[in-house]
Amino acid sequence: MQKLYGTVVPIVTPLTDKDTIDTQSLKNLVNHVIDGGLQCLYPCGTTGEMMYLTVEERKLTAEVTVTEAAGRVPVFVHVGAWNLKDTIELAQHAEKIGADGIGVVTPSFYKLSDQGLIDFYVSVANRVSKDFPVYMYAIPQNAINDVNPAVCEAVAKQCPNVVGIKYSYPDFTKLQQFMMVNDEKFSVLVGPDHLFEALCAVGGDGVVSGNAMIIREHYAAVWDAIQKKDFDLATKYQRRTNVLNATMCAINNIAAYKVILKEEGIIRTSNMRRPMENLTPDQEKALLNEMRRLDYKHVLI
């Protein structure tokens, strides 16, 4: 089964001035990521403002992404939703349209027991084909619920198509524990970008990074150095990305991505889906000025 690796890019969801999905901008963005040499597209994730999109909008976004990618890179669609019914509907839709796999965030807002989380993931994984890859996804600082290695082990034993996890909390010990799941065959990707190199150095598979949409060349350079096991060089590239990412994530990282993508002519508006906030004009100006000062287009070491 297909597994994720390298830099997986959770793309933003471009919106028109009428607050609808901007499909042309989305196509531009898909090509922007692929042309940057990154390894996978991940639409409708946290960076894609997933919980503020309707089920139909998420289906459209997935369809456009899969069609435009046209097999050039894998597309794993994030399908976690506010309830189990919508999650299963989105999961089955992703498989139907030819996605390479799915990610599924933990249920949000209400706290569940470990058994409740196991039951949730088993329910989703059993409603798609047994050879259709599923990644668990935990971001406890947003979703309330977290998962532990025992939960992953229980799910993986019952559902062989649950092949890994995207873990978006900076707990390096736990990340290494996830690698022991399923006889050390569990794929582990990290959400916090600053752990990209470190995770891969101890056996992890990669990073899920919205920042990589903007500084594609930097992430491609980190991954290339990791593949060559030149960790001295990878560390230099990683530190450069850390500086740039601190600027993009200083206020509202998703809005910042849209501002820069609009400035580069890749998407047409920087609109956020309400109640998410746009950057103010002053914030936009400060962001662009600082990124230019940092010469963000060039990979420097």
Image (cartoon, helix red, strand yellow):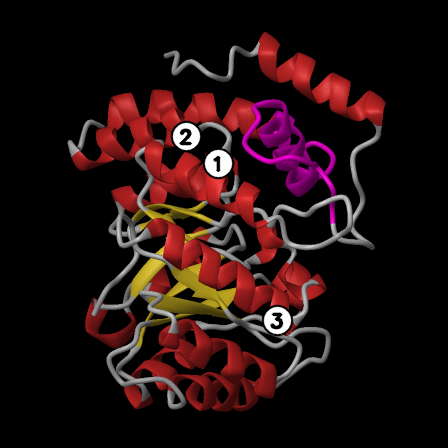
Element class at badge 3: helix
Q: Which residue is mark 2?
A: 216
Location of the N terminus by quadrant is bottom left
Q: Which residue is mark 1?
A: 213
Q: Tell me the crowding category of disc 2: few under 14, some 14 to 19, or many 20 or more residues within 10 angstroms, Cα based.
A: many
Q: Is residue 270 magenta?
A: yes
Q: Residue at x 31, y 72 (%)?
A: 133
Q: Looking at the image, is 155 positioned above or below residue 105?
A: below
Q: Residue at x 45, y 85 (%)?
A: 124
Residue 148 lies, in percent from the top left, at 47, 72
| Circle 1 or circle 3, nearest the eye | 3
Residue 157 lies, in percent from the top left, at 29, 86
Q: Is residue 117 magenta?
A: no
Q: Is residue 172 left or right of residue 142?
A: left
Q: Nearer the viewer, residue 249 or 80?
A: 80
Q: Quadrant of residue 126?
A: bottom left
Q: Earlier in the sequence, mark 3 or mark 2?
A: 3
Residue 77 lies, in percent from the top left, at 45, 63
Is the residue under label 2 in contact with that under label 1 (CB below 8 Å)? yes
Q: Is residue 79 left or right of residue 56?
A: left
Is the residue under label 2 in contact with that under label 3 (CB below 8 Å)? no
Q: Looking at the image, is 238 positioned above or below residue 27?
A: above
Q: Tell me the crowding category of disc 3: few under 14, some 14 to 19, or many 20 or more residues within 10 angstroms, Cα based.
A: few
Q: Which residue is mark 3?
A: 56
**Mark 2 is on which residue type?**
Arg
**Mark 1 is on which residue type?**
Met
Q: Nearer the viewer, residue 230 or 283?
A: 283
Q: Which residues are the magenta region? A: 247-272
Q: Earlier in the sequence, mark 1 or mark 3?
A: 3
Residue 201 lies, in percent from the top left, at 26, 42
Q: Residue at x 28, y 68 (%)?
A: 186
